[in-house]
Amino acid sequence: MSPQTGRVVATHGRHFLVESAEGVIECVMRGKKGGVACNDRVSFHPTGPGAGVIEAILPRANLLYRSDAQRAKLLAADVDQVLLVSAAVPTPREELLIRCLVAAEAAGIPALILVNKTDLAETAAYLERLRAYAALGYPLVALSAKSDVAPLLPWIADKVSVLVGASGMGKSTLVNALHPRANAATAEVSASLDAGTHTTTHTRLYRLAGGGAIIDSPGMQEFGLRHLDLDALQAAFPEFRRLAGQCRFHNCRHLREPNCAVLAAVESGAILRERWRVYQTLLRENSQGKY
Ligand SMILES: Nc1nc2c(ncn2[C@@H]2O[C@H](COP(=O)(O)OP(=O)(O)O)[C@@H](O)[C@H]2O)c(=O)[nH]1
Ligand SMILES: [Mg+2]
Ligand SMILES: [Zn+2]
């Protein structure tokens, strides 16, 4: 049979669901090289009814991924935006939020911060804290996924959005509210790709009735960015970019150099100290070697 092309709508380890003119095909990847991401366009060979082997990944416009010392962990390809889902409860880690934003910047994908659980009293103070991120250029959208997702609708219409964030923030609740069949679809993917649990163990694309799609992924505790070198890291912080050329040394690392414009901005409070601290952490991690 001749190769066909399709779009990857679910990934679980080395198993994939590929949507094509023939319907949804369960595929595996040939060989060991190269990862397949959710929303990738691939060419595959049918091997039987409803089954196939992925032969190649077609060129991507972008790729969101994290990486540790060993390997890259692909989240999604060809997306229009990253929806960073956060909430005041359970206690969020600001470092994880920053790392997700850096990954989106490095991939050239616009990011939006979605603050969930506005029904909880703790949310107001958390939203105040995040105002500084809106000032960096990341839109803030607040809602309660449990009661009303309407505030998000204009942001996701006709776009492919990928949800990222720690587990427990409400990503799956949001997807279920946006996509009435998501619960059933989760069960279907679980039945074919894993042992039949209802927790999010795979990455899955859901098409939205009004156009566009949303990709849900398992919550992450860690977000390694070992693939980013000094230049890439600096470029991923918009508040550093704005000060480009203002440090005394043109190759300033913004660590402890004299007359560093970034350090001065940290000291004056114009740059969030936590953002700069995470930048330092990333730089230190990455000097220990790439995957
Ligand atoms: N109070 C409140 N709880 C929510 C809201 N949205 C989700 N949750 C709860 O947060 C927990 C985690 O939700 P889930 O969607 O599984 O999060 P995920 O791990 O990010 O996919 C669940 O107990 C949800 O019921 C919300 O808007 N308000
Ligand atoms: Mg989930
Ligand atoms: Zn500097």
Image: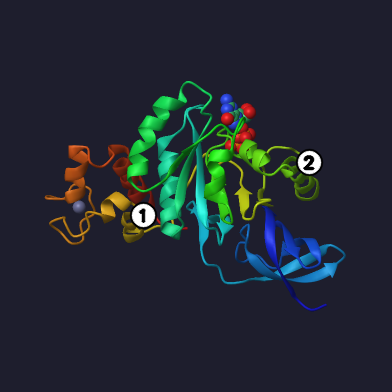
Q: Residue at x 31, y 41 (%)?
A: 277
The quarter of the rendering in which ligand 1 is drawn is top right
Q: CA distance from mark 2 to mark 1?
A: 39 Å
Asked whether 219 or 133 is in front, the reply is 133
Q: Is residue 30 left or right of residue 145?
A: right
Secondary structure at numbered mark 2:
loop
Residue 35 % position (x, y):
61, 62
What kind of residue is marked 2?
Gly
Q: Residue at x 48, y 20 (%)?
A: 121
Image quadrant where residue 37 sits: bottom right
Vertical order, 222 against 124 (above or below):
below
Position of the N terminus by quadrant:
bottom right
Residue reaching furthest to the top? 121
Graded by Cα atoms within 10 Å as few (under 14), some (14 to 19) or many (20 or more), the crowding at tag 1 reads many
Residue identified by numbered label 2: 196
Q: Residue at x 42, y 26 (%)?
A: 124
Q: Is residue 273 left or right of residue 97?
A: left
Q: Is residue 144 left or right of residue 32?
A: left
Residue 251 % position (x, y):
21, 61
What kind of residue is marked 1?
Ala
Q: Residue at x 69, y 57 (%)?
A: 9
Secondary structure at numbered mark 1:
loop
Q: Earlier in the sequence, mark 2 or mark 1?
A: 2
Image quadrant where residue 186 sits: top right
Is residue 27 among what the camera can see? Answer: yes
Asked whether 180 or 235 is in front, the reply is 180
Residue identified by numbered label 1: 236
Graded by Cα atoms within 10 Å as few (under 14), some (14 to 19) or many (20 or more), the crowding at tag 2 reads few
